[in-house]
Amino acid sequence: MAEHLLVIENLHKTFGATEVLRGVDLNVDSGDVVSIIGSSGSGKTTLLRCVNMLEDYHEGRVLIDGEEIGYTRHDGKRVRLPNSTIARQRALTGMAFQTFNLFPHLTALKNVTLGLVKVRGLAKDEAVGIARRWLDRVGMLDRQDHYPSQLSGGQQQRVAIARAIAMNPKLMLFDEVTSALDPELVNEVLNVIRDLARDGMTMLLVTHEMRFAYDVSTTVIFMHEGRIHEAGPPSEVFIRPRTPRLAEFIQNSSFRA
Amino acid sequence: MELTQFLNEAWLSRGAIWDGFVMTVAISALAIVLGTVLGLFVGIALVYGWRPLRFLVRLYVDFIRGTPVFVLVLASFYILSVVGIDLTAFQAGVLAITVFCSSHVGEMLRGALAAIHRGQTEAAMTIGLTFRQTFLYVLLPQALRQILPTWVNAATEMVKASTLLSVIGVAELLLATQQIISRNFLSLEFYFLAGFIYFVIDFSIERLGRWVERKLAYS
Ligand SMILES: Nc1ncnc2c1ncn2[C@@H]1O[C@H](COP(=O)(O)OP(=O)(O)OP(=O)(O)O)[C@@H](O)[C@H]1O
Ligand SMILES: [Mg+2]
């Protein structure tokens, strides 16, 4: 079997009595930019959070580079891996959140170096070098000594992206990273992501920015009621949707070809 | 002339006042340091403890916080000796205030940790920090910064609570003052002097606290 970077097989997730993911299958190859679109509550965020085990799930498998994430099997039974193993596996992916979640007590630079020093075990100098390179890449080097509260939302999000990417993940997860931003700050963040995509970063991104998804994606996934309802290259999904459900969603979105 | 008489008496008793002052500072400092360290563990147990442990610690905190410090002082001096633990008055007193301090610090820390947005933990986990690392480098620093003003307040309360050790015969500042007054009967003047010294101690703690707060400010 050809190795995909990320394999999601028959993923099921329930919150209490409601089944939020009802069997998701997805393969992502190295360099792919996969956008996930769909209406509110369709399970987009939950899908991302299962990939890095921010949520446990009940059935199915997630593999990154062939390694099963979060669980192992003993005599056919699924067993959750020890937390230390899961912590290591989480570093295989990086995540940027809608609410940035920078560490408020650390400067921009220290936000980025924390993981490099504590998780990757780099010496401080080396960590600072890497952190500065990524802060430069997202245009935040001149603010490296600022605390998050001294930065605009767009700047915070760029630092948060640098913090995630500096860890050198195999895959980046973006969950509506521009939704909490004032409209005039959206583009500075989208440009950073576009730049990373052009550079070959593999990513899975949930977004409501349809035009952006159309432009950067290699694949677009439309989620509906916990399943992948339709998937394909952006030119198909946005221009020639096959299902009425997707056609309606595109129709109601801001997307204009 | 009353003022010269007071100054005269104050000069004569300077040794006793100094000893009382040192004793008060020693009791307070010990109780605050030990109580804070213990309190951090109490707070951690309240938030992350295994359920039965959490329940016991909750009981401890509520019980201690619901008991007057005066009673704690008497209890640790008189009751512990009944069960065979013989402590000096000083040890018993420090123990009582330490316990009192720990329950307050524990509750403060619990509140501060609970108030930290979940996204902080999640962000830390997504860069691969273990739970222990997340706690040490992300949650605890924020919580400590958060409780600092309340903690400073509590520290000054511990100094005030140290006066209660006078009833079990620890020669701290209040008892020293009372002994001086019993010799010269200048009660108004010497209580005022003692009050002033307590004010200076608490004021110093507050200034120090503000200074640390400014140092640790991150906005
Ligand atoms: N922690 C939780 N507990 C209970 N239900 C949850 C939880 N998180 C999500 N859900 C439910 O799961 C469903 C899917 O949520 P999810 O956040 O994945 O949707 P989404 O597609 O990201 O939506 P949005 O576009 O609004 O962000 C929703 O019905 C939501 O209410
Ligand atoms: Mg969502």
Image: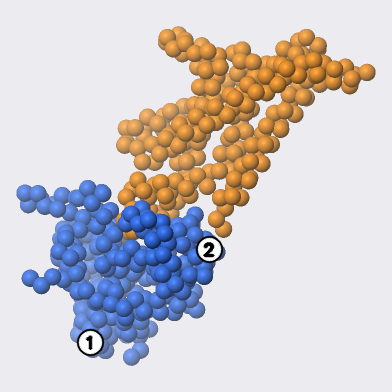
Residue type, mark 2 in image: His
Question: Is A180 situated left or right of B48 in this image?
Answer: right
Quadrant housing the C terminus of chain B: bottom right
In the rendered image, which residue does mark 1 sit on? A236
Question: Is A138 situated left or right of A230 in this image?
Answer: right
Disc 2 to disc 1, C-alpha distance: 44 Å
In the rendered image, which residue does mark 2 sit on? A146
Furthest toward the right, the residue is B1
Pinpoint the chain carrying mark 1. Answer: A
Residue type, mark 1 in image: Glu
Chain with colour orange in the figure: B
> Chain A appears in which tint?
blue
Of A134 and B34, nearer the camera is: A134
Of B157 and A32, nearer the camera is: A32
- Image: B101 above or below B20: below
- Image: A237 above or below A109: below
Question: Residue at image x 35%, y 67%?
Answer: A165
Question: Residue at image x 29%, y 59%?
Answer: A91
Quadrant of residue A196 within the rendered picture? bottom left
Of A230 and B146, nearer the camera is: B146
Camera sees residue A173 = yes
